[in-house]
Image (cartoon, rainbow, N blue to C red):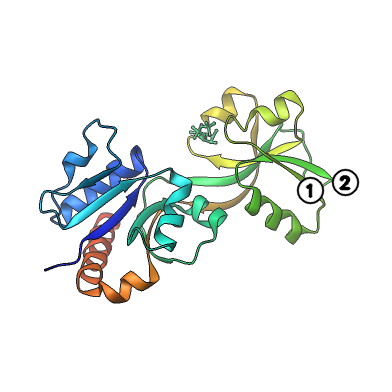
Amino acid sequence: MQDVITFALAKGRLAEKSVDILEQCGIDCRRILEPSRKLVMSDVSGKFQFIFVKPSDVPIYVEHGVADVGVVGKDTLMEEDRDVYELIDLGFAKCRLCLAGYKDFDLSKPRNIIKVATKYVSIAKDYFDGKGQNAEIIPLHGSIELGPIVGLSDIILDIVESGKTLQENDLCVLEEIVNCSARLIINKVSLKTKADVIKPLVKSIDEIIKNKEN
Ligand code: PRP
């Protein structure tokens, strides 16, 4: 009998796009998108299981092997820095990780310390350490753009998707750090022990993504 393959997904757009791709791979799992408070669901065959977790927790479940496969944003993957294989750039959920603030804020001006509000504490620390700039990182969990507006921080480090939130709050991108998109991640042990199912699945997903690009 085939091993059950467990996917860690974040409810919302990431799960919807992931299900689209899995359906194209022949996994009948559209029903998992029906409104429900259930945290564990299966595809129609029962060979694939889905657990619904917070986006930032997806790499944690996959690293611990309670999920074999996960779909997560590159921004989260960088922040969490977990021991998983990042196998495919799925090409959706595109955004940019940026420094943002008021347009007259001069990033290049020498200063003793810069105050940065962010959800991405670890990325921010690494970034400013790399620049040799002393930074006070102020961790927030949402509405990051408020930082400079209320004077909590000089700037923010956050994702920019459409740019609307910045625009409507009179802020702008000061510097782009990296482009992000959804990634397929795999538990390192599962890739060996469940290779007979995971490897063909990864190959199918890769082909679907490549066909979309062409
Ligand atoms: C994210 C991010 C920005 C916004 C960017 O916040 O933190 O605030 O989206 O998107 P945009 O460029 O399309 O405007 P999210 O919507 O996740 O809400 P949050 O403030 O609760 O984190």
Residue pointed to by mark 1: 135
Q: Which mark is residue 188?
A: none
Residue at figure coordinates x 72%, y 30% from the top left: 148
Note whether 95 is above or below 199 in the view shown. above
Q: Residues within 10 Å of mark 1 (few under 14, many from 20)?
A: some
Q: Nearer the viewer, mark 2 or mark 1?
A: 1
* Crowdedness near tag 2: few (<14), some (14–19) or many (≥20) residues, C-alpha within 10 Å: few
Query: What's the amino acid at mark 1?
Result: Ala
Q: Circle 2 sits on which residue?
A: 111
Q: Is mark 1 within 8 Å of ligand 1?
A: no
Nearest the viewer among 208 and 197 is 197
Find residue 182 and report its horizontal and vertical position in percent.
40, 51
Left or right: where 196 falls relative to 95: left
Out of 146 and 176, give the one closest to the viewer. Answer: 146
x and y percentages locating residue 162 in the rendered image: 48, 35
Image: 205 above or below 49: below
Give the amino acid type for the residue marked by disc 2 in the picture: Arg
Which badge, 2 or 1, is on the more N-terminal residue? 2
- Percent position of residue 117, x then y: 69, 38
Query: Is any part of residue 181 visible from this angle?
Result: no
Q: Image point 61% across, 45% down: which residue?
A: 98
Please name the residue shown 62% across and 24% down the image: 169
Tell which residue pokes out farthest to the bottom in this image: 192
Disc 1 is placed on an element classified as strand
Taking the image as shown, residue 88 lies to the left or right of residue 204, namely: right
Query: Quadrant of the image for the N terminus?
Result: bottom left
Is there any visible trace of residue 123 in the rendered image? yes
Residue 59 location, quadrant: bottom left
